[in-house]
Image: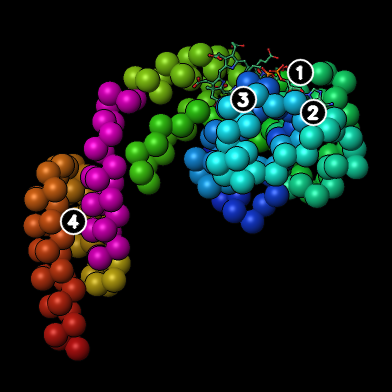
């Protein structure tokens, strides 16, 4: 079945990665970037993983994975190089858990698509297993359209929208103002400050004085 894109918080979930090779390292790197601290189960690990375990204080269970290890976890990332172990994990996964099967994506409920991040803007790219190499290429192309300082602009949009929500202005005016700063983007910090001050003066302080 085609997977649906979804933004999900894993802050209250127990995440485990089984395997300690290159793919496990890549997944761990992605997860810690989002503040997630996975447990690792593997008899051996790469040097990169060893460093991340130390730096982020991750739990490494140094052993081969067995069925009794699995009930505790909500998200199980399969990343071993042994097909019988991968199958054993699929056969014994707890009913409530979501699996990411890095060896065979369609056998798991979830995938971790490559994503371009610019602060609160995230563009995730999936080719549904057709070509991870194309997904990587599309990300590289998008990097030109959304340069690194785009994060400041996204923060500005967020602040403007938060201010207007606070001000409780009518939805027509709110949408008109929000469309304006998207259709005629203000990239310069000075211009962004001026616009936010204008919003405060006209819609926030003005309303407060009235009541
Ligand atoms: C984009 C990227 C992001 C990332 O991983 O973070 C990513 N794969 C990357 C690279 C890559 N992966 C593979 C090759 C070898 C060439 C080839 O086979 O094509 C290369 C090339 C390379 O290494 O450069 C092999 C491979 N990949 C998957 C399988 C299993 C399967 O197809 O079922 C197999 C076969 C395994 C086997 O042979 O046993 C599955 C997945 N790979 C995905 C993402 C997700 C689907 C994304 C989509 O469909 O768009 C999914 C489902 C992820 C998941 O949830 O794990 C990352 C860029 C890395 C970077 O940024 O450096
Ligand atoms: N999703 C992707 O993008 C992608 C890309 C390439 C490969 N893969 C898949 O990921 C798998 C792992 O690739 P890799 O490069 O990390 O392999 P690798 O050989 O570098 O590492 C495999 C790891 O699995 C561990 N392992 C083996 N048996 C185990 C067991 N019983 N319990 C726990 N850990 C065990 C090993 O100790 C090792 O740390 C590949 O076999 C392939 O199927 C996925």
Q: In x, y percent, where is residue 103?
A: 72, 20
Spatial CA span between label 2 and label 1? 12 Å
Q: Which of 132 and 2 lies nearest the eye of the viewer?
A: 132
**Comes first in the chain, label 4 or label 3:** 3
Q: How crowded is mark 1: few (under 14 residues within 10 Å), some or many (20 or more)?
A: few
Q: Is mark 4 on a helix, strand or loop?
A: helix
| Residue 4 placement (x, y as % from top left) | 59, 37
For mark 2, give the secondary structure: loop
Residue 47, numbered label? 3
Separation (CA) of disc 2 from disc 3: 13 Å
Q: Which of marks 1 and 4 is in front?
A: 1
For marks 4 and 2, give the CA distance: 57 Å
Numbered disc 1: secondary structure: loop
Tell me which image quadrant ligand 1 sits in. top right
Give the secondary structure at mark 3.
Answer: helix
Q: Mark 4 points at which residue?
A: 177
**What segment is highlighted magenta in the picture?**
142-164
Residue 81's disc is 1
Which numbered dot is residue 43? 2
Q: How crowded is mark 4: few (under 14 residues within 10 Å), some or many (20 or more)?
A: some
Q: Disc 1 beta carbon < 8 A from ligand 2?
A: yes
Left or right for 210, reference 135: left
Report if residue 195 is visible in the image. Answer: yes
In this rendering, is residue 171 above or below 10? Answer: below
Give the quadrant of the C terminus: bottom left
**As drawn, is 208 to the left or to the right of 122?**
left
Of 44 and 28, nearer the camera is 44
Q: Which of marks 4 and 2 is nearer the N terminus?
A: 2
Closer to the chain start, of discs 2 and 1, is 2
In the figure, is residue 40 to the left or right of 159?
A: right
**Quadrant containing the N terminus in the rendered view:** top right
Q: Measure the C-alpha gap from mark 3 to mark 1.
A: 17 Å
């Amino acid at each position: 079945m085609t997977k649906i894109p979804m933004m999900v918080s894993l802050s209250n979930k127990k995440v485990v990665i089984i395997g300690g090779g290159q793919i496990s390292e890549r997944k761990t790197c992605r997860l810690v970037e989002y503040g997630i601290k996975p447990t690792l189960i593997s008899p051996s690990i790469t040097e990169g993983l060893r460093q991340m375990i130390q730096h982020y204080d991750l739990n490494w269970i140094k052993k081969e994975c067995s069925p009794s290890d699995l009930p505790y976890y909500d998200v199980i990332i399969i990343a071993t190089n042994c097909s019988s172990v991968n199958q054993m994990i699929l056969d014994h996964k707890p009913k409530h858990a979501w699996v990411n099967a890095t060896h065979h994506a369609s056998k798991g409920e979830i995938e971790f698509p490559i994503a371009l991040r610019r602060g609160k803007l995230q563009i995730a790219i999936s080719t549904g297993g057709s070509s991870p190499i194309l997904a990587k290429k599309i990300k590289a192309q998008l990097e030109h359209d959304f340069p690194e300082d785009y994060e400041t602009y996204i923060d500005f949009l967020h602040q403007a929208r938060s201010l207007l929500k606070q001000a409780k202005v009518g939805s027509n005016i709110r949408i008109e103002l929000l469309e304006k700063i998207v259709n005629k983007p203000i990239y310069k910090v000075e211009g962004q400050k001026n616009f936010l001050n204008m919003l405060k003066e006209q819609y926030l302080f003005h309303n407060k004085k009235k009541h």
